[in-house]
Amino acid sequence: MGLDLRVQGYKTDNTKIGSYSGFGNFRESWAKHLGFNLKEMDGFGGEKKWTNEPIQAFFNHSDCEGEISVEDCKEILIQAEKDQPLLTDEQSKYSMPILINFCKASIKNNKALEFC
């Protein structure tokens, strides 16, 4: 069982961004790269409130449901493409290209990125 991404109108064979724990590891790794500890944040076991952390729409989002808007996908895509070569752990190498592909699909189809 794991987390799949979907964009209405976009078809691909690889929709699984990772297991739930793998996706969590991916977000933690990326957050650390961006200069904050996800485990310190409200909603992730910590008490620190979200203020100006980068791409909050991605990090402060449910890991099992809901959607991210096209506008937020544009911001996420910019940061993801910038950081992809710098994240070298195995989970990031697996998850980041999938996230990038789905953000591009969201923008191209003008449809939200769905977590399911």
Image: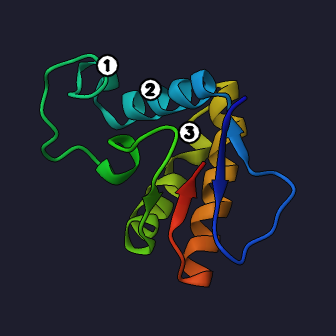
In this rendering, the answer to whether 65 lies above or below 92 is below
Disc 2 vs disc 3: which is toward the camera? Answer: 2
**In x, y percent, where is residue 68?**
43, 61
Question: Residue 74's image quarter?
Answer: bottom left
Q: Count the marks: how many?
A: 3
| Dot placed on the residue nearer the N-terminal end, 2 or 3 | 2
Q: Which three-letter amino acid code belongs to the residue tagged 3?
A: Leu
Q: Residues within 10 Å of mark 2 (few under 14, many from 20)?
A: some
**In x, y percent, where is residue 4?**
67, 46
Residue on which disc 2 sits: 28
Image disc number at residue 39:
1
Alpha carbon of mark 2 to alpha carbon of mark 3: how far?
Answer: 14 Å
Q: Residue at x 51, y 47 (%)?
A: 83
Considering depth in this image, is 87 or 56 the residue closer to the camera?
Answer: 56
Alpha carbon of mark 3 to alpha carbon of mark 1: how far?
Answer: 21 Å
Question: Residue 35's image quarter?
Answer: top left
Query: In the image, 51: left or right of 30?
Result: left
Residue on which disc 3 sits: 86
Q: Residue at x 47, y 33 (%)?
A: 27
**In x, y percent, where is residue 19?**
67, 28
Considering depth in this image, is 107 or 113 the residue closer to the camera?
Answer: 113
In this rendering, the answer to whether 36 lies above or below 52 is above
Q: Which three-letter amino acid code belongs to the residue tagged 2?
A: Glu
Q: Which three-letter amino acid code belongs to the residue tagged 1?
A: Lys
| Dot placed on the residue nearer the N-terminal end, 3 or 1 | 1
Image disc number at residue 97:
none
CB atoms of marks 1 and 2 within 8 Å: yes
